[in-house]
Image: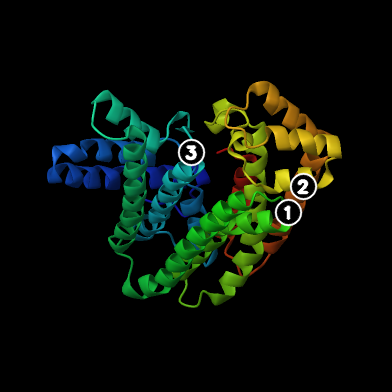
């Protein structure tokens, strides 16, 4: 695989997709060799890995690597691509925890296997079969991630530097997922706690840790780069999750792959909703209590909650916060220790992370 030192984000993404396609095909073949019963597992996971996905985590890892001045190799790109499989695990499990019916405009994994159970008239609970299957597929994606990393053929020293970052990233991801579940169970509306969930559930493992991962592979002394990348990645990671909060309420279903207002039905305790509750009048708060987290919320209810969010100026507040955090990230990479090739990709990724286009 030829990799130009001047590769664009689009070209890097294409290379990552190619690596993931080859890997999933090989692993799918192995699953099918165990028994024909695993064919739906191989098909579902291959499809989930390959369909859509912006590959943000591998792209940020590429930027972190290039920022050290190292030249991108096929081996490095294979190691970096493994991070997308960690994300696949998170998405599959997240859909189970949120009871989300769709992902990227298609049935979520647990719903796919629930439907298979029903179509084949299996015994027992179709719902439980779907959930059990999704848990296992999410676990398998995490195993695939480690397998892809260990098979990447990066040198032993680079692997030794990368593994602690990789381990920490997975710990933080799981911690953030639990914080999210816990916040939902509390049913509270704390801006501070919602920001902490945003940082650990999404921001750190999407941006900061992939940058550190790339730097650890690319440099024998990555610590100076870690500081720069944290100053860039933490604010941008929070801005990324705040944008996700906005899209979860106001996003176009054709673009998000989720029904309109899905976060409102699921009762997501986001910064956007915490800020709205904080600013709401008694009458508005009563409406929020009545409608928020109603799984049967219709479009009229969605529009009512959207109106309250706008009226309390919570949406404006979030947009201003996103702008401030983005500015912090932009300033952080104006550092002459970073190689120009890395800065170019980091700069391009700011717009992609915040605008969600690629």
Q: Which mark is residue 99?
A: 3
Task: Answer with mark 2 or mark 3, whichever residue precedes in sequence.
Answer: 3
Of the image marks 1 and 3, the number of the one nearer the N terminus = 3
Find numbered disc 3 in the image and state the secondary structure of the residue it sits on.
loop
| Residue 191 badge | 1
Q: Is residue 211 above or below residue 353?
A: below
- Secondary structure at numbered mark 2: helix
Q: Could you tell me if residue 259 is visible in this image? A: yes
The residue depicted at 64 percent of the width and 35 percent of the height is 264
Q: Position of residue 157 (x, y in %)?
A: 36, 76
Quadrant for residue 229, please give it.
bottom right
Label 1 to label 3, Cα distance in Å?
Answer: 24 Å
Image coordinates of residue 11 in percent, x first then y, are 46, 44
Q: Is residue 341 visible?
A: no
Task: Name the residue tied to disc 2.
Answer: 275
Look at the picture and state if 203 lies above or below 115.
Answer: below
Residue shown at 45% from the left, 36% from the top: 52
| Circle 2 or circle 3, nearest the eye | 3
Residue 266, position as x, y percentages in the image: 58, 38
């Amino acid at each position: 695989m030829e990799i130009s030192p001047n590769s664009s984000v689009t070209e890097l993404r294409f290379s990552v997709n190619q690596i993931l396609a080859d890997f999933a095909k090989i692993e799918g073949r192995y699953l099918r060799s165990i028994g024909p019963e695993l064919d739906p597992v191989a098909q579902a996971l291959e499809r989930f890995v390959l369909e859509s996905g912006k590959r943000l985590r591998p792209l940020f890892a590429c930027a972190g690597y290039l920022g050290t001045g190292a030249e991108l190799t096929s081996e490095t790109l294979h190691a970096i691509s493994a991070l997308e499989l960690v994300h696949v695990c998170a998405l599959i499990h997240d859909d189970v925890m949120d009871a989300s019916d769709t992902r990227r405009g298609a049935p979520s994994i647990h719903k796919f296997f629930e439907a298979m159970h029903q179509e084949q008239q299996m015994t027992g609970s179709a719902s439980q079969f779907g959930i059990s299957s999704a848990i296992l597929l999410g676990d398998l994606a995490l195993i695939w991630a480690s397998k892809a990393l260990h098979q990447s053929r990066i040198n032993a020293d680079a692997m030794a530097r990368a593994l602690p970052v990789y381990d920490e990233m997975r710990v933080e991801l799981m911690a953030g997922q639990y914080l999210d579940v816990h916040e939902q169970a509390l049913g509270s509306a704390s801006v501070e706690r919602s920001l902490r969930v945003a940082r650990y559930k999404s921001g750190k493992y999407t941006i900061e840790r992939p940058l550190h991962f790339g730097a650890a592979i690319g440099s024998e002394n990555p610590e100076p780069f870690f500081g720069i990348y944290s100053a860039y990645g933490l604010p941008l990671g929070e801005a990324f999750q705040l944008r996700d909060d906005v899209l979860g309420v106001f996003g176009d279903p054709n673009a998000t792959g989720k029904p309109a207002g899905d976060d409102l039905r699921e009762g997501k305790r986001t910064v956007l909703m915490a800020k709205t509750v904080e600013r709401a009048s008694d009458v508005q708060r009563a409406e929020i209590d009545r409608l928020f987290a109603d799984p049967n919320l219709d479009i009229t209810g969605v529009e009512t909650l959207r109106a309250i969010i706008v009226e309390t100026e919570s949406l404006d507040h979030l947009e201003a916060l996103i702008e401030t955090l983005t500015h912090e990230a932009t300033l952080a990479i104006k550092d002459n220790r970073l190689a120009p090739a890395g800065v170019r990709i980091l700069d391009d990724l700011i717009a992609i992370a915040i605008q969600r286009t690629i």
